[in-house]
Image: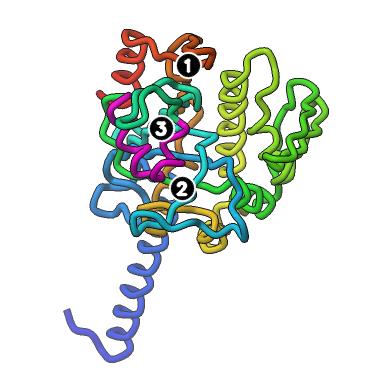
Amino acid sequence: MVFNNKSKFSFWAGLFLLCIGLTLIFLSLNVYIPSIVPEKFKILTLTERKTILFLGVDEVLQDNKPAKASNDLLWRGRSDTIILLSIDPGKNRINVLNIPRDTRIKIDGYDIEKINYLNAIDGPKLTKKYVEKLIGVKVDHYIEINLEGASQFIDEIGGIVLKVPHRMQYTDVAGMLDINLHPGIQLLNGKQAVEYLRFRHDNLGDIGRVKRQQEFIKALFKKALDPVVFVKAPILINSFNEAILTDLKPGEIIKIASFIRNVPASKRKIAILPGTFGELNGVSFWIPTKKETKEIVKEFFYD
């Protein structure tokens, strides 16, 4: 076949445009329908299973700056929220296990304590170590969020719609809490959403709070499906730098966010660590039940 100069230009220009078009298509599929993208073309989504520990710290430090300990930047407060997240791109599913903050554990050198005390001792790495021991699952990464930072994040995504189940009113000057929420479905701003998460002065105590965390996670998944929020992801990550402590790189967070937003509701499960209430020396604990814990760990974290 013979090409003149004009036909050569048209051929290469067309080939170039075709390559650009294919690239844009694959980028779009990576973001919106990652499950149908061939393995070698997966650019912005996960290719391997991940288990991530999420911690929400109930102590707001001065100037929102983390303290230093063991040469790591740590938020030194008790973890108000403890969640273990299993992300499985192979099966296109997400499993979320809530671990009650009052879960009873034996800490070396500290005897019997509540699991939320671990972060106050030596930060997320110590919590990660004991969660692995408690659940029997290797944790790949951790993300720790200061609640003040969570409040700012929720404001930046435009608030979150939640159903407040009943009147929530509680004041704790020392804990910097002034909760005042009325029942009903409503758009909560960052401050109100954090109050919704932290309230635990009802008949179910910490378990009631964990159930509200589950509702919050579902609402957050729904919000993440908003294209406006997803487009803002890089900006949100940058603004979150001072409020988040993690061993994940920003690019990895974007991959995780891209995957999570595309997992259908039927492929998302949320549960509480099985257990019962118990008491030791007048202190209330959540005591995991071994058989039920083993079953849910097998379902959530293993094939």
Q: Is residue 59 above or below residue 19?
A: above
Q: Nearer the viewer, residue 219 or 112?
A: 112
Query: Which callout, 2 or 3, points at the residue further toward the start of the chain?
Result: 3
Name the residue rendered at 33%, 19% in the picture: 299
Numbered badge on residue 286: 1
Q: Residues within 10 Å of mark 2 (few under 14, many from 20)?
A: some
User: Is the C-beta separation of discs 1 and 2 under 8 Å?
Assistant: no
- Going by the image, does 278 lie left or right of 13? right
Amino acid type of the residue tagged 3 in the rendering: Leu
Percent position of residue 101, x then y: 50, 27
Q: Nearer the viewer, residue 113 or 50?
A: 113
Q: Residues within 10 Å of mark 3 (few under 14, many from 20)?
A: many
Write down the region rendered in magenta: 116-134
**Dominant SS in magenta:** helix
Q: Which residue is mark 2?
A: 257
User: Is the C-beta separation of discs 2 and 3 under 8 Å?
Assistant: no
Residues at marks 1 and 2, CA–CA distance in whole angstroms: 31 Å
